[in-house]
Amino acid sequence: MRLRSRRHYGVSVHCTALGEVDLTNAAGKMTMSVLIAVAEFERRLMIECTRPGIASACAHARAEGKVMDPTCALTDAQCAKALHRLAADEPVARFTRDYRTARQSFMRVRQSAASA
């Protein structure tokens, strides 16, 4: 049930952290709108700041021969071994533990091999 429908029953929300601001009146709505805008600004600022760092880490890992692409958590050699193990009907849970990766990674390997 949303705040608007609760207002019909006489329910109001007061934020004590903001000095007893009633969030149901015009001043409270404006206060919340400002806080929401600031939170969204901070979120977007953090995203902007982390993207170059992530790109740099991926480039550094690629230079060392590691995989940093979240869509491909396995190297080509691991993908080949995984396909062999999948063909042998080995339980996926066993080699997700061996490779310390998610089940979905192996399902992507299977799907890409089937479409190729």
Image (tube, rainbow, N blue to C red):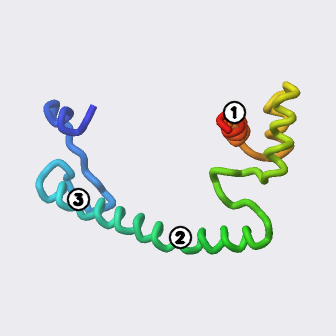
Mark 1 or 3: the one toward you:
1
Residue 51 lies left or right of residue 13; in this view the side is right
Please give the name of the residue rendered at 79% of the width and 39% of the height, measured from the top-left corner. 96
| Cα–Cα gap, marks 3 and 2 | 26 Å
Q: Residues within 10 Å of mark 2 (few under 14, many from 20)?
A: few
Q: Nearer the viewer, residue 100 or 58?
A: 58
In primary-sequence order, the first of circles 3 and 2 is 3
In primary-sequence order, the first of circles 2 and 1 is 2
CB within 8 Å, label 1 to label 3: no
CB within 8 Å, label 3 to label 2: no
At which x and y percent is residue 72? 68, 51
Instruction: Please tell me whether residue 102 is drawn above or below residue 19 in the rendered image.
Output: above
Task: Quickly name the residue at label 3.
Answer: 33
Please give the name of the residue rendered at 19% of the width and 53% of the height, measured from the top-left corner. 22
Please give the name of the residue rendered at 78% of the width and 53% of the height, measured from the top-left corner. 75
Q: How many marks?
A: 3
At which x and y percent is residue 12? 20, 43
Task: Quickly name the residue at label 2.
Answer: 50
Q: For numbered disc 2, what is the local secondary structure?
A: helix
Quarter of the figure with the C terminus:
top right
| Image disc number at residue 98 | none
The residue at the far front in this view is 116
The residue at the far top in this view is 89
Mark 3 or 2: the one toward you:
2
Label 2 is placed on what type of residue? Thr
At which x and y percent is residue 20? 24, 57
Residue 71 lies left or right of residue 94; in this view the side is left
Task: Quickly name the residue at label 1.
Answer: 114
CB within 8 Å, label 2 to label 1: no
Residue 104 lies left or right of residue 5; in this view the side is right
Label 3 is placed on what type of residue? Ser
Q: For numbered disc 3, what is the local secondary structure?
A: helix
